[in-house]
Amino acid sequence: MASGIPDLPGVDSTLAFFREGYRFVGNGCDRVGAPAFRTRLMLRPVTCMRGPEAVRAFYRPGRMTRRGAMPASVVALLQDRGSVQTLDGSAHRVRKALFMDMMGDDRLGEARRLLAEEWQTAADGWRGRTVALRDELPPVMTRVALRWSGIDPEGTDVAQRAEELSAMIEGAGGLGPSHLRARWLRARSERWARETILTARSGGGDSVIARIARHRDADGEALRDDVAGVELLNVLRPIVAVARFVVFAAHALHVHMAPAGPVGEDDAHRLGEEVRRVYPFFPVIGGRVLQPFDWRGTAFAKGDWLLLDLYGTNHDSAAWPAPGDFRPDRHRDPRADRLVPQGGGDYHLDHRCPGEWLTMALLTEAILALTSMGYRVPPQDLDISTRRFPPWPADGMRIAPA
């Protein structure tokens, strides 16, 4: 592959990736003085890239596939076999439409209403106690996810579902016992999801689970029970993952904006967008070239492996003035190729997370709730490691509601 993209010094960068964490690609780009560099990870050649120009190159429709682009350990916990993210072409577009049809204003409004209800119930139990939002919010978001999907929380073990869905997120970025435990919990969750889909197939209605149960793919065939179960988890898990953004929002309100009182809808939305930009969520996204192309003097062939730096793009000084500053007002002028905490590209044509609108709706509602409730933040370790995938505040963001 003839290349105008510089090489990162060294034989292999796997250890550096884990040592530097979220900052690995950005550090490498700074080191070579370019928005991309070539190296090896796990001894496999890879091109790492960051910034709006890289986002546009990476997400050109039809150019990349997710298949074979991320470690199997990550895929097994966050997607699994047969999911929408493993598809391309017409198969991907038809399956993706199933998820995009869930993102109408009425459905987003319903999600916010459910969160407001569940938040109030949980907050009533927090009063007079010191609680870690890291521990309290996943069950809250699990109840929201179940209800929004058309599943009665009283008919399932919410604590188990919260444990399973949280473990998929926690275990995706590591190896060892925690990852193995997450794989075991994922298998248990998939068994529950298949059984839930089987029950839904005998019913009707227009709920999320009913839509998944009756969906037909591009070939006209209904989803197999196991694949439908995987896609159900691909609805539930990202909603539970919003808990991490909410914890980060509480952190931001205390560290960057204290004292913070009630805010309006627009301010809450912009604050949420800045939380998604600043705080570590997905570090990178991988792709394998489907359609050969040239970029920055480099000819990329079919099968070449690329990693787009999401965290680094959100902190790229060429795209964000004073990227280390927490400035919600910078989102008065949004640009899709700069803000990529959950990936970029076209929602309908690319592999961009279809639940990003739902994330923004839930985060906005949670910020309104946070800024409206009275609480103090006791002394604690507020450090957030950028070497763990994904991190929490060290002490779980403890608050003491009045």
Image (spheres, helix red, strand yellow):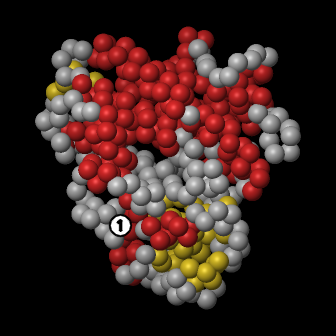
Quadrant in the rendering for residue 272: top left
In the image, residue 287 lies at what x, y percent? 61, 63
Question: From the viewer's perspective, is 386 left or right of 353?
Answer: left
Asked if 389 appears above or below 132 in the picture, the reply is below
Question: From the viewer's perspective, is 218 left or right of 352?
Answer: right
Return the residue nearer the eye: 174 or 212: 212
Q: What residue is shown at x 38% (from left), y 59% (from top)? A: 314
Q: What residue is shown at x 72% (from left), y 50% (from top)? A: 92
SS state under label 1: loop
Question: From the viewer's perspective, is 87 left or right of 383?
Answer: right
How many badges with numbers are in the image?
1
Q: Quadrant of the C terminus?
A: top left
Return the residue nearer the eye: 68 or 96: 96
Decide if residue 41 is in sight here.
no
- Residue behind mark 1: 319
In the image, residue 162 lies at what x, y percent? 50, 26
Q: What residue is shown at x 52% (from left), y 38% (from top)? A: 238
Return the residue nearer the eye: 104 or 82: 104
Decide if residue 281 is in sight here.
yes
Q: What residue is shown at x 49% (from left), y 50% (from top)? A: 342
Return the residue nearer the eye: 89 or 43: 89
Quadrant in the rendering for residue 334: bottom left
Amino acid bearing label 1 = Ala
